[in-house]
Amino acid sequence: MELETIRAFFAWCSVINMALLLWWAFFLLLAHDWTYRIHSKWFKMSVEKFDSIHYAGIALFKLGVFMFSLVPYFALRIIG
């Protein structure tokens, strides 16, 4: 597999993952109450607990995107 193919793979992974991250954040900002109502039917939790779970999830997802998509992409850009 060529270096350019691997570099393109990590670039597109980064773009797709960042789009998912932005979608998640904007969805919670714009439809917070609706999302909470849906989730609170399945799981009994307070609004504060719901917010903290999603905040932690967004933070972990963002960390994963940086560690497993952006860092390898930039490393391949540096060496190639």
Image: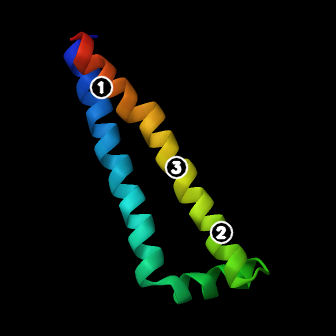
* Mark carried by residue 74: 1
Residue 38 appears at what percent x and percent y?
A: 62, 83
Q: Position of residue 69 (x, y in %)?
A: 39, 34
Q: Tell me residue 23's x, y (percent).
A: 38, 65
Q: Is residue 2 visible?
A: no
Residue 28, horizontal then vertical, whole percent: 48, 76
The image's mark for residue 61 is: 3
Disc 1 to disc 3, C-alpha distance: 19 Å
Mark closer to the chain start, 1 or 2: 2
- Return the disc, 3 or 2, that comes first in the chain's sequence: 2
Nearer to me, 2 or 51 = 51
Residue type at tag 3 = Phe
> Mark 2 packing: few (<14 Cα in 10 Å), some, or many (20+)?
few
Amino acid type at image mark 1 = Phe
The reply, left or right, for residue 32 in relation to residue 50 is: left
Residue drawn at (29%, 18%) of the image: 76
Q: Is residue 60 positioned above or below 52 on the image?
A: above
- Name the residue that disc number 2 marks: 52
Q: How is the image coloured?
A: rainbow
Residue 48 appears in the rendering = yes
Say if 30 sits above or below 6 in the image. Answer: below
The residue lying at 58 percent from left, 64 percent from top is 55
Which numbered disc, 1 or 3, marks the residue closer to the eye?
Answer: 1
Q: Earlier in the sequence, mark 1 or mark 3?
A: 3
